[in-house]
Amino acid sequence: MSCQNLLLMSQTSALLPLRGRLLHNELSYNVITASSFRYGELLLEGAFYLALVTNGTATQACGAQVRRLRPRELLVLTPSLRVALTEPAADFALTCLRIAPPYFDSLPDGTLLYRQAAGGAARGRMPVCRLADEDFLRMRAALDLFRFAPDGERMYERGVARHLCSGCLLMAADLLAGGPRDAAGYVSRGDEIFRRFKRLLMEHYRKAHTVAFYAGQLCISPAYLSRIVKRTTGRTVRDHVARLLAAEARRQLDCTDREIKEIAHDLGFADASAFGKFFRKEVHASPTAFRRCRP
């Protein structure tokens, strides 16, 4: 396999159906206009999207449902949805934030928004919310902050992006709920357990890789935790752990000169061999081959 193919394969989650400002591998900000429709259609799929229509109209198709998007409408999409945009008016403009699933899972404020958006989709509702003037201006201002957010991988740069994302998610969750309400009153026990699991995961994923560890920390059974995580996200606990481990492994291999055995130890693997087996399964390349293909 060539170096070019390895790099493309390793960066699959970062490839965007829409090209815009890539803040880092799993987060991008786009302003879509009529000129973006080079082939007559734009797809929003495979990620979480906050997309705000700021001007003009376009046709939106989600499954069998087709409607005309209008100004001040907010689309909130989960990775299971596939939305096609066509027939944009000449003055159409859409401000769009794309959040890859692994990055979304690392954010502390995504659970409520996910449950509301996924619940609406499950009931056959179009994932669109029409905003009042004040709400529209507030959401637009929040999304526009991504124009100026730092786009590097250093800790403070990623921290800025995380805080901006969390703010937008909380605003969107409030809007989907239909106005100012105490969000805590609308989170079920399962949602709360999942939120606590995500916090634990971000703290311990480098060393703790088993369902039993997280279930023990939450004082529930592994089977119960597995059901909640699967029901909420469609993925297993292992999937969540593996995605974070793989992302951190790629980052360290790409951005540092640490020895592979050091990275393996840092990420909680018994030895470099166990780490290599895991990495090949997740990234489809050995750690050595991945590092060799760095630009």
Image (cartoon, rainbow, N blue to C red):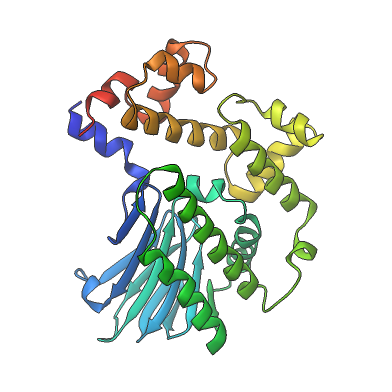
Residue shown at 17% from the left, 28% from the top: 2
Q: Position of residue 217 (x, y in %)?
A: 76, 32
Q: Position of residue 164 (x, y in %)?
A: 50, 61
Q: Position of residue 106 (x, y in %)?
A: 55, 46
| Quarter occupied by the C terminus | top left
| Quarter occupied by the N terminus | top left
Residue shown at 59% from the left, 48% from the top: 233
Of residue 220 and residue 144, the one placed in the foreground of this image is 144
Of residue 236 and residue 33, the one placed in the foreground of this image is 33
Query: Is 171 on the left-hand or right-hand side of 266?
Result: right
- Count of marks placed on residues: 0
Residue shown at 43% from the left, 11% from the top: 273
Q: Position of residue 55 (x, y in %)?
A: 36, 85
Of residue 284 and residue 154, the one placed in the foreground of this image is 154
Query: Is 165 on the left-hand or right-hand side of 294?
Result: right
Query: Is 122 on the left-hand or right-hand side of 263?
Result: right
Query: Is 154 on the left-hand or right-hand side of 218?
Result: left
Q: Is residue 181 visible?
A: yes
Give the answer, above or below, for where 241 lies relative to 99: above
Give the answer, above or below, for where 68 lies relative to 170: below
Of residue 260 and residue 158, the one placed in the foreground of this image is 158
Give the answer, above or below, for where 242 lies relative to 108: above
Residue farthest toward the front in the current orientation of the protein: 156
Residue shown at 77% from the left, 29% from the top: 216
Give the answer, above or below, for where 150 lies relative to 74: above
Q: Is residue 17 visible?
A: no
